[in-house]
Image: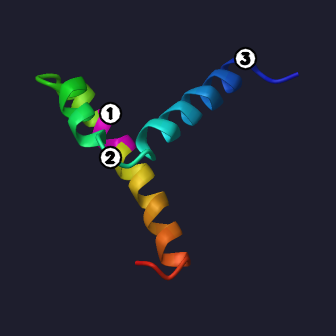
Amino acid sequence: MKNQKAEELQEAYELCEKIFCTGSGIMEAGDDFALDNHDKQDFFRILFAHFAKIKQKELIKEGIY
């Protein structure tokens, strides 16, 4: 039986992955989400960097970037 918190973290990760890997519109959404809130700006920046790094590695592996 899985830990409930682990399951919730998995769901949160998958949701973030879906949101940040859709491509277009993420920067505008980030602006709307984090407007005038430093903690939310940091949160967005960290997640954006994480998923951008993953995508960059995929593109390098595929010889595209």
The kind of residue on which mark 2 rests is Ser
Q: What element carries label 3?
A: helix
Magenta residues, as a range? 43-47
Q: x%, y% of residue 30?
A: 25, 34
The kind of residue on which mark 3 rests is Gln
Location of mark 3 (residue) = 4
Q: Which mark is residue 24?
A: 2
**Residue at the extreme top of the image, as rendered:** 4
Q: What element carries label 1?
A: helix
- Closer to the camera: disc 2 or disc 1? 2
Magenta: main secondary structure equals: helix
Q: Residue 43 carries which label?
A: 1
Which residue is found at the position 48% from the left and 35% from the top?
Answer: 16
Within 10 Å of the Cα at label 2, are there few (<14), some (14-19), or many (20+) other Cα atoms? few
Within 10 Å of the Cα at label 3, are there few (<14), some (14-19), or many (20+) other Cα atoms? few
The kind of residue on which mark 1 rests is Phe
Q: In this view, does 47 lie to the left or right of 30?
A: right
The mark that comes first in sequence, 3 or 1, is 3
Tell me the CA gap for discs 3 and 1.
23 Å
